[in-house]
Amino acid sequence: MFETTSRPVPVTKEMVKKAYRKVKANKGSAGVDKESLEDFEVNLLDNLYVLWNRMNSGSYFPKPVRSVSIPKANGKKRVLGIPTVNDRIAQQVVKDYLEPRLEAQFQDQSYGYRPLKSAHQAVAAVHENVLRYAWVIDMDIKSFFDEVDHELLMKAVERHVAEPWVKMYIRRWLESPAQQPDGTLIQKGGQGTPQGGVISPLLANLFLHYVLDKWLLKQYPGVAFVRYADDIVIHCHTETEAKQLLEAIRARLAECKLRLSEEKTKMVYCQNYRRPKRKDYGKKFDFLGFTFKPKPIISKKGGLFLGYGSTISQKAQSRIIEGWKQLRWHRRSDLTMQDIADQINLQMVGIIRYYGKFKLRGLQPLMKRFEFRLAKWVLNKYRKFRGSYGEAHKWISELKISYPAMFYYWTVFKHV
């Protein structure tokens, strides 16, 4: 079905054009050649023709990826590998070619970077599982994208890919060195697939499909799990089962040349009104920006009981608040309230639609923190309030009545 007898590399011009349109839609920065999408489009048809011709002849070789460090919430840095525009398009060609057949193999419990799958679906699956299972293994693979073994990955590729040209290009991408900001080239040494590469998520899903997904379903059919790329939550019925499984996972990862991040991996007890109290284990864990923990639930009859659910994580809130601080508009007395609304509303839509999906009320403290910054701007702009936050909040409340749709969150939270 996926093979061709007409030519060794069946890449058509239409495949390259389609791949370019996807890369353009995803935007992204320039690679080591400093060529942006805008630069690439100056001679678009010629550039696409050259890429198509080289891919068909087997003479396409990727450039090194550009290493970029971005800060993580824990103060450390994550290194991204940014391919050139040319290389992103080439990777998209192969991804489009391979994805349908690999998708047919992947398990339903895998949600990350897959068509018709989403982070919200993964979080919803965890919501369902914590009602049925009392124990969670909150699991973190240490430096997965940096340490994935090339030979084991290619072994997984070869189970589903017969075409030599596909395997040749995947291996070339895997072996592409990383160029540091000072120009130094770092060779891969048989490990790693760059975060930032178009095809990397598909290859990561394939690798973890064999390392964990199929293994868990075969060896431990009584447990449940949810995986979003390398972010994994495993649900067990008992403490003993969770302990045994965690040891087995350590051994399984070592066998596949991976390792757990011990400081981030933990067992969690999902305390609710039906389960006896435990003081020897933590009761909360984070997944995809949400914190799962015991929380009071209002019953249909109006009573309270201890449930187990999710809300926006403290880490996500801190990141958002820090972003607002960095805008520093509370010091900009030249701005109007409408200027601030225009600047912030699109982000607010994203925050509320993502983190408010399961419990909108959980975002009220975050919205109050935003309103505090808004009051700070009011005090700096209008000296008549004489430093009174109470008067500034009162003025904002009156403005809400006159202009209820100025800020998106005003339309959602009527009484923040």
Image (cartoon, rainbow, N blue to C red):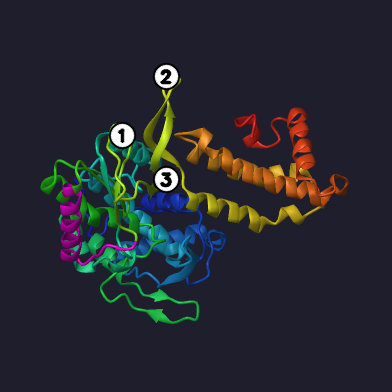
Residue named by callout 1:
128
Please state which of the two labelled residues, at mark 3 or mark 2, is closer to the viewer.
Answer: 2
User: Which residue shows up at 29% across the image and 64% down it?
Assistant: 169
For residue 40, the mark is none
Judge whether residue 202 can be spotted in this image: yes
Q: Secondary structure at mark 3?
A: strand
Q: Which image quadrant is residue 297 in?
A: top left
Q: Secondary structure at mark 1?
A: helix
User: Which residue shows up at 74% across the image and 33% down it?
Assistant: 397
Which contiguous range is marked in magenta? 240-263
Horizontal and vertical percent position of residue 292 = 39, 43
Q: Quadrant of the N terminus?
A: top left
What residue occupies the far right of the structure in this picture? Answer: 384
Task: Identify residue type, mark 3.
Answer: Thr
Task: Identify residue type, mark 2.
Answer: Lys
Mark closer to the chain start, 2 or 1 = 1
For residue 300, the mark is 2
Horizontal and vertical percent position of residue 202 = 31, 54
For residue 291, the mark is 3
Q: Is residue 389 magenta?
A: no
Q: Is residue 246 magenta?
A: yes
Task: Check contact, mark 2 vs mark 1: CB within 8 A.
Answer: no
144 or 193: nearer the eye? 144
Q: Callout 1 environment at 10 Å: few (<14), some (14 to 19), or many (20+)?
A: few
Horizontal and vertical percent position of residue 204 = 29, 57
Horizontal and vertical percent position of residue 167 = 23, 62
Mark closer to the chain start, 1 or 3 = 1
